Image (cartoon, rainbow, N blue to C red):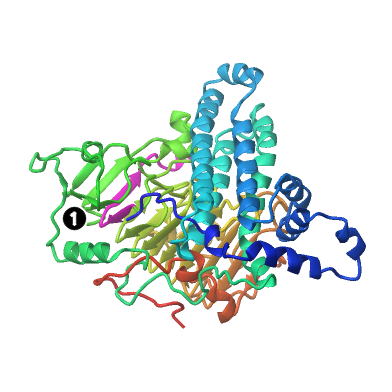
Amino acid sequence: MFRKVVVPVISLILVVGVVIGVVAVVNNNKGSDGGKKEENLSPEMKIATQLCQPSEYKEACTETLSSVNSTDPKEFVKQAILAASDAVKKSFNFSEDLVVKASKDKREKMALDDCKELLDYAVQELQASMSLVGDSDLHTTNERVAELQSWLSSVLAYQETCVDGFSDNSTIKPTIEQGFVDASHLTDNVLAIISGLSGFLKSVGLQFNIPSNSRRLLAEDGFPTWFSGADRKLLAAQGNGKVKPNAVVAQDGSGQFKTISAAIAAYPNNLKGRYIIYVKAGIYREYVTVDKKKPNVFIYGDGPRKTIVTGSKSFAKDGLGTWKTATFVAEADGFIAKSMGFQNTAGPDGHQAVALRVSSDMSAFLNCRMDGYQDTLLYQAKRQFYRNCVISGTVDFIFGYGAAVIQNSLIVVRRPNDNQQNSVTADGRKEKHATTGLVIHNCRIVPEQKLVAERFKIPTYLGRPWKPFSRTVVMESELADFIQPAGWMPWAGSIHLDTLYYAEYANRGAGANTNKRVNWKTFHVINRNEALQFTAGQFLKGASWIKNAGVPVLLGLKR
């Protein structure tokens, strides 16, 4: 189950004698150059300097850690998180002038209100991270490192969702962006410190292992290894029609509830275990949110073409921020959906119109369908897994800031409006040390029937870089002939082309030839060893996730 249990991760490494070991080794690791300069540093500053080595923003990092009056590594990590939290809270306090400006425009005011909600989410994640690090209990596992990285990366995701709520010609947006610079840099510093912690401790003779790269997300039975034994049995039972739901939703009145929202609202207090909702066949015209206070929801239907949740909110027609257009929203951790359909029917004229938005950590979607046009699936934050799904759309229709693996799924490109181009993905990774990105593994990317006749006239690309460190990998997938030879397209001119990471491995089909792919230095045709880091177990650090019978699985790479 996935309530946010505060369990330590850094405390695991603080054994008797660590302080003496750290100071001794740091003192003995002076090089010939700069040795005298380093001798003038206090033991605390020597540790701070070494911990900040992986950071992209070293000056800010060392300044943050300079106030630590301890040689306990845990105190340095806590101080880094505290600094990031303070910066986020500071950005939260919008000036009176900004509020006045926003009040004159409905969309600006709505975007500013959204920011307050999103920054509250960011503060909650930082508070959880601080509690996790500060706990003195030594009962923990290495997987908690991945959890901490996921929470911290989600802070960046919420900040970017806030910024992206303003239009490009907004007079307020530049002020909002500038206000987030410190918070973004300081959050990335914490991620850099965590990523380099293993090497730092090894240098002082201590062992700290981030989860092994050989671990896989999926077990032989086809479910993520992060699923508990109870969840595995539950899904197996559901597949055999033997599960007993807590709530049944049916439009004809044959269940306890007629709407999905009513069933979710009945989520019991102090629940232990999963809250299971069975949604009978039907088209449910409602907007559904599984909020953060309702973890461990398992919702299943009669099939993705039979049980459908549909809506039509959009940026163009309703003036909403993209993230608020979603028909179905999963925010609470541990969410599972099976055999469900999610739609946004705003059409291509609606522009940004999300069918499904997910910010649930360790969430999974099995045999589901997400249909829309622009911005169909928003993997907003944290670790997500999609298997045996169908995802359709036109422009940037798989996009987000989280960490998502889509496996064994059908990706259908639809016909866009005239004068539009199709882009399957648009990843929004903002900072270098965010443990996020998108992996498409063993999928098929094909045109819908309405696009077939014009598939060479209307360009279709695998993706484009929405943010500076956009990261997308397509591997062992079948790419139909309509994929442009260049494969990938720029966002605007040369923006982000020097910092993104795009890669392909062992794809097949007429659109998989990489001979004429973009010549960016940041695009890679990778080998098998490189591809292994993007298998679900490694990329999502999913060693504790899914194990259950009934779904075929690829263990690691297919070939």
- Pointer 1: residues within 10 angstroms few (<14), some, or many (20+)? some
Occupied quadrant, residue 255: top left
Q: Is residue 274 above or below residue 547?
A: above
Rendering coords of residue 334 (x, y %): 35, 53
Closer to the camera in the image, 217 or 357:
217
Left or right of 499 on screen, residue 82? left
Q: Is residue 134 visible?
A: yes
Closer to the camera in the image, 451 or 319:
319
Occupied quadrant, residue 55: bottom right
Q: Is residue 454 visible?
A: no
Rendering coords of residue 18 (x, y %): 63, 64
Quadrant, the N terminus: bottom left
Residue segment shown in magenta: 335-351
Left or right of 90 on screen, residue 58? right
Closer to the camera in the image, 473 or 56:
56
Is 350 colored magenta in this rendering?
yes
Rendering coords of residue 30 (x, y %): 84, 68
Name the residue: 56% across, 81% down. 528
Left or right of 499 on screen, residue 127? left
Extreme residue toward the bottom, this view: 559
Closer to the camera in the image, 499 or 541:
541
The residue where tag 1 is placed is 302
Extreme residue toward the left, this view: 254
Q: Is residue 380 above or below residue 104?
A: below
Residue type indicated by callout 1: Asp
Q: Is residue 342 above or below residue 487?
A: above
Is 225 colored magenta in this rendering?
no
Rendering coords of residue 199 (x, y %): 66, 69
